[in-house]
Image: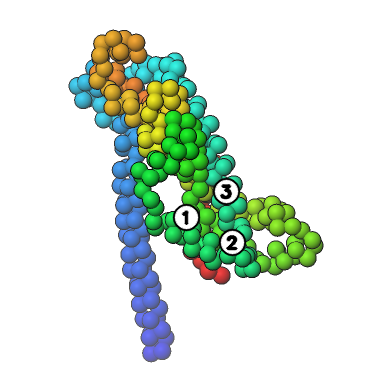
Amino acid sequence: MSIVNETNKLSSRKLRDGMIKSRKTRIGDLLIAFICLILMLLCLLPMLHVLASSLSSADALVKNEVFIWPKGWNIDAYQTVLTTEKYVRSLGWTAILTLICTLLSISLTVCAAYPLIYTNLKGGRFINFIMLFTMYFSAGTIPYYLLLSRLGMLNTPYALIFPNCISVFNVIIMRSFFFGVPDSLREAGEIDGASPIRILVQIYLPLSLPVIATLSLFYAVGRWNGFSDALMYLKKSESEKYWPIQLLLYNVIKNSTQTNEQAAQEGFFANGVSKTIQMATVMFATVPILLVYPWLQRYFVSGVTIGAVKG
């Protein structure tokens, strides 16, 4: 009987400890969920405020009555943006520019990373050193500007495409992913007489969709949101047609105080209306790139964890 009683006491003690641990686990999960909810709200509230402001009346904006819910519903700002040539042209040009830069950047990244996986590559260590050197040291903005001026790229779309068409950090990520592909696959291709290009196209690229999608997303977001290079390199008035949407938005906000004549030409009749145009332009500049994430989400999770687990 004593043995049975001790066993029952031990079982009840384990059950009680398990319940306490389970309760602590639930409390921890709730705390983590609460923190995630707060962070999500901090990210969403500015976006909701911009959306509400773009859908509100000018009087409500002037009186600062808009927070996360529109006051005086109207879509005049969106109609203005969609019917004004410079907004439509800038949005379309930014989409084309982002597509061109993403395709060029991911192609150059693959071409730069693939040869570095061959251990017998002559000068491979020196190439790696030079690439890493450029990550930590650069000439600076002024020499960079003078170089583009000498090359005749200023005030042309080439200044937005070629200077930042490849990232050494992304090359290192791509190379690390290529290193994770079993060497036996490459060796089997070599035994069958496949050339390095064919091995890349038929073996490495099909297995590298997660990292390609992830880096493509990084390149696309960086180009879509970039405006500092356009601000520095597109100075002349004739280069205004090459303004990306972010630079146009920057100038809209910067020049929000306009003369009556300019306001009449653009369809503005009050400072509040000018602000609604700004908010609508922000939405047009933000929403398209956000729509890309759901399509690449399944690749993004596996792509960003490259190198986190060593097998």
Determine the image quadrant of residue 47: top left
- The disc at residue 267 is none
The type of residue carrying mark 2 is Leu
Where does residue 119 sit, x and y in percent of width and height?
62, 68
Q: Earlier in the sequence, mark 2 or mark 3?
A: 3
Structural distance between the alpha carbons of marks 1 and 2: 14 Å
The residue mark sitting in front, 1 or 2, is 2
Separation of residues labelled 3 and 1 (CA atoms): 13 Å
- Determine crowd level at label 3: few under 14, some 14-19, many 20+ residues with C-alpha closer than 10 A: some
Depth check: give the residue in front, 18 or 235. Answer: 235
x then y, percent, for residue 3: 41, 89
Q: Is residue 58 visible?
A: no
Q: Residue at x 30, y 13 (%)?
A: 262
Front residue of 49 and 38: 49
Q: Tell me the quadrant of the picture where the N terminus can be found.
A: bottom left
Image vertical order of residue 102 relative to residue 114, above or below = above
Q: Which amino acid type corresponds to the residue marked 3 in the rendered image?
A: Leu
Label 2 and label 3: CA atoms lie apart by 13 Å
Element at badge 2? helix
* Residue identified by numbered label 3: 108
Q: Secondary structure at mark 1?
A: helix
Q: How many marks?
A: 3
The answer to whether residue 127 is visible is yes
Left or right relative to 40: residue 91? right
Q: Disc 1 marks which residue?
A: 169
Q: Secondary structure at mark 3?
A: helix
Farthest residue toward the right? 192
